[in-house]
Image (cartoon, grey):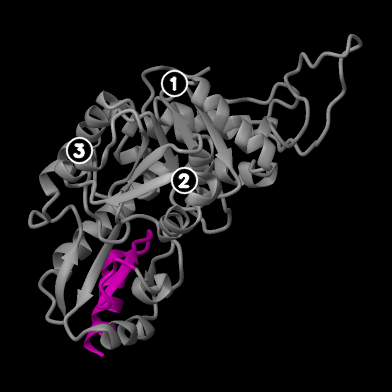
Amino acid sequence: MTDPTWTPRTLLAQALGHIDEASRAVVPPIHIATTYIRDPDNQYRSGNVYGRPDNGTIREAEAIIARLENAEAAMVFGSGMSAATAVFLALKPGDHIVASSVMYWALRHWLLNDAATWGLKVDIVDTADLQAVRAAIRPGETKLVWLETPSNPLWSITDIRAVADIAHKAGARVAVDSTSATPILTRPLDLGADIVMHSATKYLNGHSDVIAGALATAKADEFWARIKRVRATLGQILGPFEAFLLIRGMRTLDLRVRAACASAMELATRLSNHAAIHQVLYPGLPTHPGHELAKRQMQGGFGGMLSIRIRAGEEAAIKAAAAMKLWKRATSLGGVESLVEHRASIEGPGSPCPPDLLRLSTGIEDVGDLYADLDQALRA
């Protein structure tokens, strides 16, 4: 039984304090069964029917995420992309979507190239610009505004509360990709959003060994029921072993995020004065255009991600990444290890990333070691 006064750190460390009744274990067991016995009258009073739409371990992970996000309900998926696309697939043909111009590149690609196949209309705008959001919304036709804040990898900040107010007046829902902020720093539902999405592969799991996604909703309404049907019909549910690992990872979420935030802040400050760098993109810096909004919207830190722009250009940026020893050249973010990536070459044509940009995901290593490795690579 959890206490309503417990902080997120305590709730996470205890995994909501669940004790398995059968074994009295403090770590919930993995439920791997795919099918379940019916009652004599052919009913399923246990709530378990079949493994594709639901699972006991899945429900454990969902309960933790719902509690963290102050949500009425949560769902976990086999990947962040399956969680995000499930929201769009729950819309109806002809519905209009407004989405952030800087966002996870694979989802941006899907919206621009595949959403029309499902009869969806999409406008991509700078959602940090409220006038642009107002201009893009079509009252009565726009059904969803999709935000990513801070936006990956340029780290612009969108005012969730202001966009929610604009969207709701036009009859549209607001969904927020809060992967980089995590519920430790921002709770979009508390700011007026209707749905929050996480690539749980990243900070929620935090150990680079699970592919997962999550959604949480302010109201378990008919639209939420449609999303749940999409997950069940398309088989997008997370596997029970992966859900078990996700629960394990979330136990240390608060500690990992705060450590990454502290290191990212120190690195951003020190790198701002580095001769090889002409710009550091990080909302924690007072020079960042979204800094004041980030201070109001993000509690306890500005995230563990930052980007640096190399003064000598694209070739020098790629060489600097290659010269790093502690920072690993790899896709993804939010793990305990620090990662570096040249995003423009990864995303390809149409990427909004400047070619001189390196994205940094700060892990939990010693920040002095992290800076020393960056410094030697940049000097090289």
What range is drawn magenta here?
351-380
Badge 1 vs badge 2, beta-carbon distance below 8 Å: no
Question: Which residue is disc 1 drawn over?
Answer: 219
Which callout, 1 or 2, points at the residue further toward the start of the chain?
Answer: 2
Q: Earlier in the sequence, mark 3 or mark 1?
A: 3
Q: Is residue 147 above or below residue 171?
A: below
Image point (17%, 66%), residue name = 280
* Element carrying mark 1: loop
Label 3 crowd bin: few (<14), some (14–19), many (20+), radius 10 Å? some
**Quadrant of the frame with the C terminus:** bottom left
Q: Residue at x 30, y 84 (%)?
A: 320
Question: Mark 2 and mark 3: span between their CA atoms?
Answer: 33 Å
Residue 80 placement (x, y as % from top left): 51, 49
User: Which residue is found at the position 61% from the left and 36% from the top?
Assistant: 230
| Residue 351: % across, % down | 34, 68
Q: Give the percent coordinates (x, y) of residue 111.
A: 44, 52
**Was residue 311 drawn as part of the magenta stretch in this picture?**
no
Q: Is residue 168 left or right of residue 222?
A: left
Task: Name which residue type carries label 2.
Answer: Leu
Residue where numbered disc 3 is placed:
134
Up-down: is 232 above or below 330? above
Q: Point out the tag, 2 or 3, that comes first from the N-terminus.
A: 3
- Judging from the image, what secondary structure is the residue with disc 2 in? loop
Q: Quadrant of residue 61?
A: top right
> From mark 3 to mark 1, how far is it between C-alphas?
25 Å
Q: Farthest residue to the top: give it.
A: 41
C-alpha span from label 1 to label 2: 22 Å
